[in-house]
């Protein structure tokens, strides 16, 4: 079974630009979550999408947004990039069940560098 | 607000020298506690899910245990290939699938 895939793997942008990252979940998974990982803050939750609806959001500014398509693929967008947005952006997928604790499986990440 | 604290921040072991990593947590209604392994520049790789106090799971040289306040990842006779950052995360009742992560323990195993 194919794992979570993310594109692109590496990206270099300049301040003020915008960027779109893509994530394809494991087949059958309906929940996609996005996380930002930096050396100082560790892994921080951005948002979660389930069946094309955002059902949870972390504490990030409105410049960070996302969406999910009917095939469960997801994109996240960051507008007006700042130097502090440089990070590894990770996508994770799961079934989306709200019962027993549900394992999320991560993709390889997109490394974003903002100059 | 769910919180996870991992200790130590970094650990250096000799090959074959067993040790334990700690994960302390506070969560509103634990649905699951998760351990991941992360190699530099890669995404976290799933290791274990623990659901309730007293539960234990094993995989090769790793064993994870859970109490009501903390979890331990025991590493028995580690090898250099076990070198990685080990991440602990919790999933509470209020956050759908959201995981709250600790900062991780960076493990280095020397031959």
Image (spheres, coloured by chain):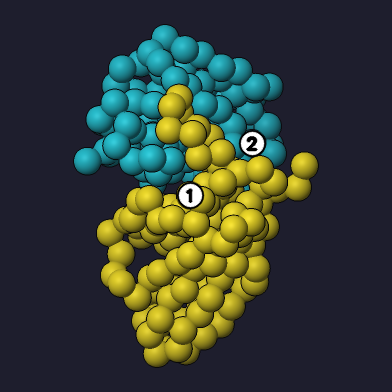
Figure check: A33 above or below A9: above
**Residue A2 drawn at (x, y percent):** 75, 47
Q: Nearer the viewer, residue B94 or B45?
A: B94
Occupied quadrant, residue B77: top right
**Residue B54 drawn at (x, y percent):** 42, 9
Residue at x-position 29% and y-position 21%: B69
Q: Which residue is mark 1?
A: A50
Q: Quadrant of the C terminus of chain B?
A: top right
Colour of the chain lettered B: cyan
Badge 1: chain ID: A
Q: Which residue is mark 2?
A: B82
Residue at x-position 65% and y-position 68%: A7
Q: Looking at this rendering, what residue extends furthest in the top direction?
A: B54
Q: Looking at this rendering, what residue extends furthest in the right direction?
A: A1
Figure check: B57 above or below A39: above
Dot 1: few (<14), some (14–19), or many (≥20) neighbours within 10 Å? many
- Residue B103 visible in this rendered orientation of the protein: yes
Q: Nearer the viewer, residue A48 or A107?
A: A48
| Closer mark to the observer between disc 1 and disc 2 | 1
Q: CA distance from mark 1 to mark 2?
A: 34 Å
**Residue B27 drawn at (x, y percent):** 27, 31
Dot 2: few (<14), some (14–19), or many (≥20) neighbours within 10 Å? some
Residue at x-position 61% and y-position 44%: A29
SS at circle 1: strand
SS at circle 2: helix
Q: Nearer the viewer, residue B96 or B45?
A: B96
Colour of the chain lettered A: yellow
Residue at x-position 59% and y-position 67%: A22
Badge 2: chain ID: B
Figure disc tally = 2
């Amino acid at each position: 079974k194919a794992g979570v895939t993310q594109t692109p793997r590496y990206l270099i942008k300049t301040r003020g630009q915008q960027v779109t990252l893509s994530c394809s979940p494991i087949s059958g998974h309906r929940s996609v979550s996005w996380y930002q990982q930096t050396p100082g803050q560790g892994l921080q939750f951005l948002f979660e999408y389930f069946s094309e609806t955002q059902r949870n959001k972390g504490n990030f500014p409105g410049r960070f947004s996302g969406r999910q398509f009917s095939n469960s693929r997801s994109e996240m967008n960051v507008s007006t990039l700042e130097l502090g947005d440089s990070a590894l952006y990770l996508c994770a997928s799961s079934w989306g069940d709200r019962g027993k604790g549900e394992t999320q499986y991560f993709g390889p990440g997109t490394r974003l560098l903002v100059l | 607000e769910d919180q996870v604290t991992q200790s130590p921040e970094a650990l250096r072991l000799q090959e074959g020298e067993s040790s334990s990593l700690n994960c302390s947590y506070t969560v509103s209604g634990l649905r699951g506690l998760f351990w991941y392994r992360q190699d530099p520049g890669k995404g976290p790789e799933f290791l274990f899910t623990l659901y309730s106090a007293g539960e234990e799971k094993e995989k090769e040289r790793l064993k994870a245990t859970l109490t009501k306040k903390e979890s331990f990842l025991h590493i028995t006779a580690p090898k250099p290939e076990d070198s990685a950052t080990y991440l602990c995360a919790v999933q509470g009742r209020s956050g759908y699938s959201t995981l709250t992560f600790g900062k991780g323990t960076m493990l280095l195993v020397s031959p």
